[in-house]
Image (cartoon, grey):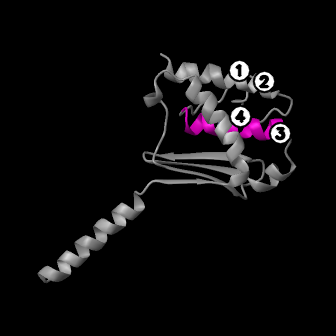
Amino acid sequence: MSQSKLFIFISLYIALVIYTLRPIHVVEPELQGKINLIDNLINANCNNPEDLNRPFQTVYEFTDLPTNVIGLCNTLNHYYKIQIDKTYWAFATEREKFSLIAHEMTHCVLDMNEHSNDRDNYMYYALNPSLSIATITNQIIENTKKVCNE
Ligand SMILES: [Zn+2]
């Protein structure tokens, strides 16, 4: 390979890395309100923000998830992606929507991988439609303090 071809190759490679690693924050507009509420709740109750998972690439999107799956959190070092089943969302109540976003953000932002054994906790593996927004709010605060106040 001649010098100039090598230079072009290296330049293209660097451009590709810069492009791939650029900051991206993609949010489905319909999800933004609840994301903001939960983000504010987490920020207000966290004494050590460096304990939170705040990568420079985040995606919140609607998609078609497999039967019985209503939400997913995927994480990598520099990246997380939350996927919400669009059919579930279309028929969900306000408290179910709040619970689902809170559940996935707890996995992704608080980096909590485990589920609760308590059916009355928003981190139970299956969504409990009778949980009130007030109860879920208290449970988010409890988890936030567990993750970033110790
Ligand atoms: Zn989960």
- Indicate yes or no: mark 4 CB to ligand 1 under 8 Å: yes
Disc 2 residue type? Ala
Question: Mark number for residue 94?
Answer: 3
Is 129 above or below relative to 70? above
**Circle 2 sits on which residue?**
134
Distance, label 4 to label 1, CA atoms, is: 18 Å
Does the residue at mark 1 contact the one at mark 2 (Cβ under 8 Å)?
A: yes
**Circle 4 sits on which residue?**
125
Distance, label 1 to label 3, CA atoms, is: 17 Å
Does the residue at mark 2 contact the one at mark 4 (Cβ under 8 Å)?
A: no
Distance, label 3 to label 2, CA atoms, is: 12 Å
Disc 3 residue type? Glu
Does the residue at mark 4 contact the one at mark 3 (Cβ under 8 Å)?
A: no
Residue at left offset 77%, top offset 55%: 86
Secondary structure at badge 4 equals loop
Secondary structure at badge 3 equals helix
Chief SS of the magenta region = helix
